[in-house]
Structure formats: structure tokens, C-alpha cells
């Protein structure tokens, strides 16, 4: 039995040695094959086993030869392209575009002295004339009031004498009468009265209906599509760089909400506008301090105008509702001057203010005199001028033309 055990152990040792030798031979063949593949572009066509080995090795080799740095480079290049595409509707030599891109590079670089923490990246935009067509033939909210009071068959016979007077004077301005004046306060109060008793949803639905009407001065566009596409790109660009974007407009807040809805990617709680009174539907003349909202109530417009968010009122609205000094401001008129100065003056962060100049007379309802005055104001106040004519490759997109 001892001899048999020894012989069995010997056979096992011989078998194990044979397996090791065989594996070593395979490894040697693979190594030689790989070397041969790298050293020579030809291989024997008759050796099917070598061909199979080469195919496998080639697959492995190709996988190994793609360095991680190449993939990272490709991703970086794609990111560069994406950054460029954010402002693709701006001309390459637009100084305003260059200033914004340079600014963004500085304030998003954590190693830069100009770095701004994400929580402090606040940008404020005017609406009419800054991201939306301002005069077609006049402000959107002015046109809305005229339609409501003078044309809407469901309301025109119910309008008060005051509403009709304001709307009639506005229509005269639309028709070119330069001797007619309508104050912002008069307009605000007329809007509040004309839409009194509506719920917020009803008011916004009314705005939705009106904005879907054709834009009077353009072919191929509705009133609600009259947003400046290059400026919408700016909003997207800022949001992609962790900015919180607000609209601060002189237009009624509820009208702003209806206009922006479905058109601009800004949350409704970041839309600031002029305000009118809101009350409970069964509140009547009871003061809000003495009334409690019930399950039978709806929140409705109260028919009373409160504040016009223009000039210094924009600044107070910003601090009341946002509570943080912005670092970027975008406007187009002297009504945005206070907001622009508040943004860039005594700011602990690097900050900029941009102002649009309505100098395009072919694609937009431009005004050379107003544009020249704004350029002068930009020079005097250290604002950055934006030329609608020279800085943008389009305004409303293809297929839209002025009548």
C-alpha cells in the first residue's frame, strides 16, 4: 500500500507539473503574439488559432490604449462647446457678450479673488424692453387694458367711466397722439379695477388668452412669443452657472406671471411686479386684520392698486422680497437706473449692469434717439451697453418679420 501511495502521489505531482507547464506555454505564446502584433502589421493567414488569438489581443490592446485623459479631454471640449452655445445668438465680437463670459469665468472660479458663492449669485431682469417686446404698439399691459375695457364683449359695457377714460387716452397714444398723457398710477389703478373680483388663476388665464393673439406689428409671432431670444439665452446661461434669476418689472405681478408662464424658465416666486390688492371673496369691506379666510372663500383681486415697481421702488422690492444685493442687473430704460446702480455700487462682489439699446429699426420697433441716450447713460454710469442691432444675430427667431 505504501508503494501504491507513493506512485499515486508521483502521478499527481507529474500531472500538476504538466498543467503548470501548459499554462506557462500559453502565456508565452500570448506574450509573443502580442509582441508580434505590435511589431508587424502582417500575420500568417493560414494559422487560424493565431488569428483568433490576435483578434482577442487586439480588442484588449485597443481598450488599454484609450487613456482616461483622452476621455476627459473630449468631455472638456464638449463642455466648451456647450458654454459657447448658450450665447450662440450673440455675435462673436459683441462686447457685452465678452464682458459677461469673462465675468462668469472669474466669479465661478473658486481660486479667483472674484469668486462668488452660489447663494449670492443673484441676477435681476426688467421685463418690457429687456426680455420682451416693449412697444407693439405699446407696453403689453397697456394693450391688455385697452382690449379689456374697449373691446372685450364680456366686459366693455361694465367698465367704469374712469377705466374708459384711461383706456381711450391710451388708444390715442397708440394712434400717435403725442399730446395725450397717461400716468403710470392711472394705468395701474385702471388695471386693478378692470380685473377686480377675478381669482389669480382667472386673471392669469385671461392674460394667456390675450398673449395668444397675433402680435400687431409682426408676421409669424403672437404677443406671447415676443421674447428676445438672445436674452432668454442669457437667462439660461446664468442658471447653468447657478444663478438665481428674478424678474423685477413695472408690469402688474399677475400679468407678469401669465406672460412668463410656459415661455421663460423662471419660477413664479421669482417674479416681482407692481401689486394690487388681494382679498377673500367674501371679505367685503372688512379690514384684513378683522377677517379670517374660510373654506367658502377664494383669493381674488380687490380692485385697488398698491404700488408701481419702477425706479427706486425696484430697489426696495428687491430688498423686501429677495433680501440680497444682486450682482447682475439687466434693463433698458431710466426706470431701471436705480436697480442698475444698486447692483454695482458698494457691492462686496464683482458686479455688472447691462442696458439694452433699442437701435434695431428693421427687426424691432427701434428708436435711434432713445438708443443714443441710453448709450450716453451707460458711459456716464459705468453700465454695459447692449446693441440689439449689432450684438444679436436674431431677435425673435426665423420666420418673424416686421409688418
Image: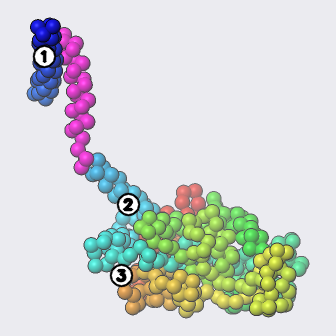
Query: In this orientation, which residue lies closer to the viewer: 112 or 203?
Result: 112
Percent across and percent down for residue 380 are 40, 90
Left or right, 389 with reference to 198? left
- 44 is within the stretch colored magenta: yes
Q: CA distance from mark 2 to mark 3?
A: 22 Å
Q: Which mark is residue 13?
A: 1
Query: Which quarter of the figure has residue 96?
Result: bottom left
Q: Earlier in the sequence, mark 1 or mark 2?
A: 1
Q: Which residues are magenta?
A: 42-70
Q: Earlier in the sequence, mark 2 or mark 3?
A: 2
How would you rate the neighbour count of disc 2 (Cα within 10 Å): few for under 14, some for 14-19, many for 20 or more? Answer: some
Q: Secondary structure at mark 1?
A: helix
Q: Quadrant of the N terminus?
A: top left
Q: Quadrant of the C terminus?
A: bottom right
Q: Earlier in the sequence, mark 3 or mark 1?
A: 1
Question: Which residue bears the numbered disc 3?
Answer: 350
- The answer to whether residue 229 is above or below residue 357 is above
Amino acid at each position: 500500500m505504501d508503494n501504491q501511495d507513493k506512485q499515486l502521489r508521483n502521478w499527481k505531482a507529474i500531472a500538476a507539473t504538466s498543467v503548470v507547464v501548459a499554462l506557462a506555454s500559453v502565456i508565452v505564446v500570448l506574450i509573443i503574439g502580442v509582441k508580434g502584433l505590435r511589431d508587424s502589421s502582417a500575420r500568417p493567414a493560414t494559422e487560424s488559432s493565431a488569428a483568433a488569438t490576435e483578434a482577442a489581443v487586439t480588442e484588449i490592446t485597443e481598450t488599454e490604449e484609450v487613456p482616461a485623459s483622452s476621455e476627459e479631454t473630449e468631455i472638456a471640449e464638449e463642455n466648451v462647446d456647450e458654454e459657447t452655445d448658450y450665447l450662440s445668438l450673440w455675435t462673436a465680437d459683441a462686447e457685452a457678450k465678452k464682458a459677461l463670459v469673462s465675468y462668469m469665468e472669474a466669479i465661478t472660479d473658486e481660486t479667483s479673488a472674484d469668486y462668488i458663492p452660489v447663494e449670492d449669485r443673484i441676477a435681476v431682469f426688467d421685463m418690457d424692453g429687456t426680455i420682451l417686446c416693449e412697444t407693439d404698439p405699446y407696453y403689453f399691459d397697456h394693450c391688455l387694458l385697452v382690449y379689456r375695457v374697449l373691446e372685450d364683449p364680456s366686459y366693455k359695457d361694465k367698465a367704469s367711466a374712469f377705466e374708459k377714460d384711461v383706456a381711450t387716452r391710451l388708444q390715442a397714444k397708440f394712434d400717435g397722439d403725442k399730446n395725450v398723457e397717461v400716468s403710470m398710477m392711472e394705468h395701474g389703478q385702471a388695471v386693478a379695477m378692470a380685473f377686480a373680483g377675478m381669482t389669480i388663476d382667472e386673471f392669469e388665464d385671461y392674460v394667456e388668452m390675450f398673449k395668444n393673439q397675433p402680435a400687431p406689428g409682426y408676421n409669424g409671432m403672437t404677443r406671447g412669443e415676443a421674447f428676445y431670444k438672445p436674452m432668454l439665452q442669457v437667462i439660461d446661461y446664468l442658471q447653468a452657472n447657478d444663478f438665481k434669476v428674478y424678474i423685477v418689472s413695472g408690469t402688474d405681478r399677475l400679468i407678469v406671471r401669465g406672460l412668463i408662464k410656459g415661455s421663460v424658465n423662471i419660477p413664479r416666486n421669482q417674479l416681482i411686479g407692481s401689486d394690487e390688492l388681494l382679498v377673500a371673496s367674501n371679505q367685503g369691506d372688512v379690514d384684513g386684520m378683522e377677517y379670517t379666510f374660510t373654506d367658502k372663500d377664494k383669493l381674488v383681486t380687490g380692485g385697488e392698486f398698491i404700488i408701481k415697481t419702477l425706479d427706486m421702488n425696484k430697489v426696495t422690492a428687491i430688498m423686501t422680497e429677495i433680501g440680497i444685493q444682486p450682482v447682475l442687473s439687466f434693463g433698458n430704460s431710466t426706470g431701471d437706473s436705480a436697480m442698475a446702480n444698486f447692483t454695482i455700487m458698494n457691492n462686496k462682489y464683482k458686479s455688472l449692469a447691462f442696458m439694452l439699446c433699442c437701435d434695431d429699426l428693421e427687426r424691432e420697433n427701434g428708436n435711434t434717439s432713445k438708443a443714443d441716450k441710453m448709450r450716453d447713460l451707460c458711459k456716464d454710469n459705468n453700465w454695459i451697453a447692449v446693441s440689439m442691432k449689432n450684438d444679436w444675430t436674431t431677435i425673435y427667431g426665423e420666420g418673424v418679420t416686421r409688418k
